[in-house]
Image (cartoon, grey):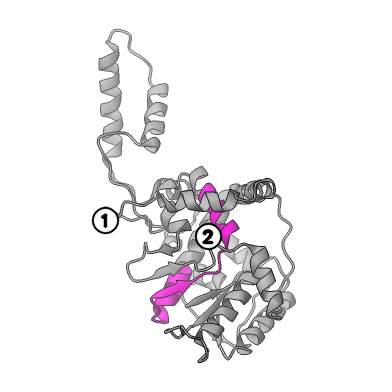
């Protein structure tokens, strides 16, 4: 299954797949692609969204491919996958408001973006299972990978870097998400499209405040750094490739489905922060020795940690903003 997204990367990926399936290609691809467009352009008007869908259908049909359209809003609210083809897709003029209604009103933009990013990934996996596909191609490029890596570190998802930014995301037991364009930048793909006379689908972009969320801030930081130091993005990606996830644990996060590290004898960074907060809020008993006070504090802390959480550290911070538990399934 190929996830189509508006822009140069998807158009280049579409052309690469068509070329790989061509009989004249020496190394022909051995799979049958299924294209899916998860419609979520809620900053556009209804007419603009319909025009974009018509252009996407026209582009995929020009390569003799069909594309299935799924409403992201409907999936989040109902968990039902309705696959539309051609122009049978019905656009709701209040889809954006309906989508926002599943989270609390005063949710910070960083948490809102992270929730929708996770739900989008979960939606693609559910669609792939319904279509009986074992692999998903996504058009993420190098700037996306580098900014996501730094964003993960900032949001406490360092343990999940390998699955969120690596070539293969295999956290799901039956579906693998592959990122074939992760080492390409936008300029390379734009030149590829120009050289092959491709006309990518474009839409009006939303006005974004680069300082309104961690996601936007990290993308701006990486982009600005890349302008002065051209090896920045490649260096970040190569460092991320060296990070691995411990897959021996059987516990998975209820929201993002990433593994939850098993507790060890030593405190990790998350536990150290919680323990420091506990000690800071305790009234010290100076009649006891320092070692005894530490032992009592650690015993109290360990008692609270005995109850396992259904969420990883990062998702435990954003799950409270989701109004219904059904939205995390």
Q: Position of residue 48 (x, y in %)?
A: 73, 75
Q: Residue at x 52, y 90 (%)?
A: 24
x, y percentage for residue 255?
41, 57
Residue 36 is inside the magenta segment: no
The tag earlier along the polypeptide, 1 or 2, is: 2
Q: Residues within 10 Å of mark 1 (few under 14, many from 20)?
A: few
Magenta segment main secondary structure: helix
Lateral position of residue 300 relative to residue 54, left or right: left
Residue 147 belongs to the span the image colors magenta? yes
Task: Check disc 2 and report the residue beneath it.
Answer: 117
Residue identified by numbered label 1: 250
* Depicted 59 relative to depicted 320: above or below: below
Q: Is residue 220 above or below residue 73?
A: above
**Rendered residue at 51%/56% (across/down):** 115
Q: Which residues are magenta?
A: 123-151
Most foreground residue, 86 or 320: 86
Helix, strand or loop at mark 1: loop
Check disc 2 and report its element: helix, strand or loop: helix
In front: 271, or 283? 271
Asked if 62 appears above or below 206 in the picture, the reply is below
x and y percentages locating residue 241 in the rendered image: 44, 53
């Amino acid at each position: 299954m190929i996830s189509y997204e508006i822009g140069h990367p998807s158009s280049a990926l579409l052309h690469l797949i068509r070329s790989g399936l061509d009989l004249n290609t020496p190394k022909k691809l051995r799979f049958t692609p299924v294209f899916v467009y998860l419609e979520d352009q809620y900053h556009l008007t209804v007419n603009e969204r319909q025009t974009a869908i018509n252009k996407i259908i026209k582009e995929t049909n020009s390569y003799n491919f069909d594309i299935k359209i799924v409403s992201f809003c409907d999936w989040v609210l109902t968990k039902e996958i309705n696959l539309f083809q051609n122009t049978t897709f019905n656009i709701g003029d209040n889809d954006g408001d309906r989508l926002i209604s599943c989270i609390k009103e005063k949710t910070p933009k960083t948490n809102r973006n992270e929730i929708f990013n996770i739900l989008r990934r979960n939606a693609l996996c559910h669609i792939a299972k319904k279509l009986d596909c074992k692999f998903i191609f996504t058009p993420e490029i190098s700037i996306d990978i580098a900014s996501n890596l730094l964003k993960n570190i900032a949001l406490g998802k360092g343990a999940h870097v390998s699955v969120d930014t690596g070539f293969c995301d295999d956290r799901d037991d039956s579906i693998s998400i592959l990122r074939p364009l992760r080492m390409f930048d936008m300029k390379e793909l734009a030149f590829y499209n120009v050289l092959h006379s491709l006309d990518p689908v474009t839409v009006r972009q939303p006005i974004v405040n680069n300082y309104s969320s961690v996601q936007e801030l990290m993308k701006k930081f990486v982009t600005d750094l890349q302008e002065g130091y051209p090896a920045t993005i490649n260096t970040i990606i190569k460092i991320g490739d060296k990070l691995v996830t411990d897959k021996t644990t059987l516990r998975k996060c209820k929201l993002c489905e990433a593994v939850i590290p098993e507790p060890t004898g030593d405190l990790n960074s998350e536990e150290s922060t919680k323990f420091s907060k506990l000690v800071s809020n305790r009234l010290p008993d100076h009649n006891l020795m320092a070692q005894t006070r530490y032992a009592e504090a650690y015993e109290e802390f360990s008692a609270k940690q005995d109850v396992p959480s259904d969420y990883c550290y990062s998702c435990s911070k954003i799950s409270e903003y989701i109004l219904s538990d059904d939205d995390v399934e």
